[in-house]
Amino acid sequence: MKKVSWSKFMFFAMLLLLLTLAACSNNETSDEQSMDDSDATTEETNEESTEADADGGTEVGTDDSAETEPKVTDFEPAFPEQTRAPAVTTETELNVEVIAEGLDVSWGMEEFEPNRILMTQRDTAELLIVNLEDGAVSDPIEGTPEVNNEGQGGLLDVTVAPDFAESRLVFLTFSQDIEGGTVTAVGKGVLSEDETALEGFEVIFQATPAYEGDLHYGGRITFDEAGNLFLTTGERSDDPIRERAQDLDAYLGKVIHITQDGEPVDTNPFIEDENALPGIYSYGHRNIQGIDFNPQTGDLWIVEFGPQAGDELNIIEPANNYGWPTVSYGIEYSGELVNDGISEHEAQGFVEPVYYWDPTSAPSGMSFYDNDAIPEWENNLFIGGLASSYIARVVIENDIVVGEERLLSEEVQRFRDILVTQDGALIAITDGGLIYKVSAAN
């Protein structure tokens, strides 16, 4: 009896060991995810994919980190707070509602009257007025420019002049066909009194040189306190054109500072440099789709796409070089290193990002919360995520990211732009044609 019992014990022990080894092998296989090569050659990978490539990842988010996915790269941050911030949670009870749906790819928006926004439709090049209280959407406003809507092109951002109540001036960015290819263009027109047309629309600025491509237009605009415009551009993605982000004789991969007539602002850092374009404010950027002023400090902040990982949050100072494509905390879509894998910005003479994401978040429009309707959100930064399908709430102290929260991830939407209304609601528009309103439940 003892021999039979021992044999059974050994049999079941060996069976248990084999099952355990098989389970471990299956888990390892399922964790080795890779992106479809057909989607992995352009910025559309970041924009279309909802999963990050985990191959080669060496670190998973710690228990207190907002990021729970493995890293794509092996790069180490320049300082501990530069990536994978601790998770934070909003304590205020929130009300989330969809106030409009069935729209096109909604790209940019601006509140021009309380609870009324102008909103662009990228692919159809339509400019609409949306009532945020009842979700009513106007007919398309006439007089918008012709656009090239291939790839990432189309009608992009919209803002209104600081004196809109008197001037009724509306500013638009869009991808425009000119000789030699396409450019990111800025134009302006007067919104008619009956709100049905943009009158006298004219192009005031073109981010030359033109290029035969349909990626990385950038295109965000915002006004400074003096009534001048900041414009962001992309470096048009392809190699070698992307190298021109480092060139001061090209408006690609730049933050640009112009007047309402499209002229360079006379305090720009390169205004006296005969070898530089006078509208350039900063350079070495990849594809900037978010820009806003920090209400606490007055500093200009931007967020820009990295390649695979390495999406950056930066504070913009005049004449600064932010390093792309010489340095990056990301890697190529092919899995190869960018420029032999140089990630350290400061050591190469560039500005380190305040924060970066690994894996990618594919960050788009952003807005600081300059309101007291939800006190715990005051001065926090909200960034729309495309591939990541969430809104990132970023908590900042002394220009350091000290916390991050992922909002609306359960909606599985590509959040293209974020706006904070005058009454403190958070408005988010999506590539799927939805408009979300997030507000305090009370």
Image (cartoon, grey):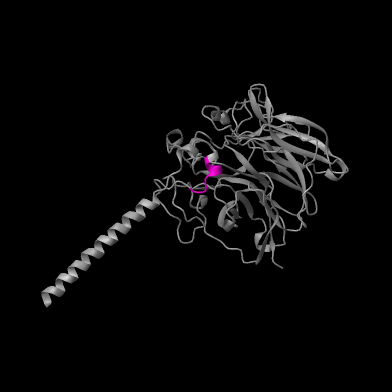
Q: In this picture, which residue range is highlighted in magenta?
A: 45-51
Give residue 64's position: percent from left, percent from top. Answer: 49, 61
Residue 150 can be seen in this image: yes
Nearest the viewer among 21 and 331 is 21
225 vs 289, left or right, is: right
Counting every numbered tag in the picture gives 0
317 vs 345, left or right, is: right
Q: Looking at the image, which residue is at 78% across and 35% down?
A: 188
Up/down of 299 relative to 422, above or below: above
Nearest the viewer among 91 and 266 is 91
Q: Does the magenta segment cover residue 48?
A: yes
Residue lying furthest bottom in this view? 1
Could you tell me which quadrant the N terminus lies in? bottom left
Could you tell me which quadrant the C terminus lies in? bottom right
Up/down of 305 relative to 22, above or below: above
Q: Does the magenta segment cover residue 178?
A: no
Q: Looking at the image, which residue is at 25% across and 62% down?
A: 17
Give residue 159's position: percent from left, percent from top. Answer: 75, 42
Residue 276 can be seen in this image: no
Give residue 215's position: percent from left, percent from top. Answer: 59, 34
129 vs 88, left or right, is: right
Up/down of 298 relative to 148, above or below: below
Specify the quadrant of the image occupied by residue 194. top right
355 vs 19, left or right, is: right
Specify the quadrant of the image occupied by residue 437. bottom right
Specify the quadrant of the image occupied by residue 128. top right
Give residue 323's position: percent from left, percent from top. Answer: 53, 36
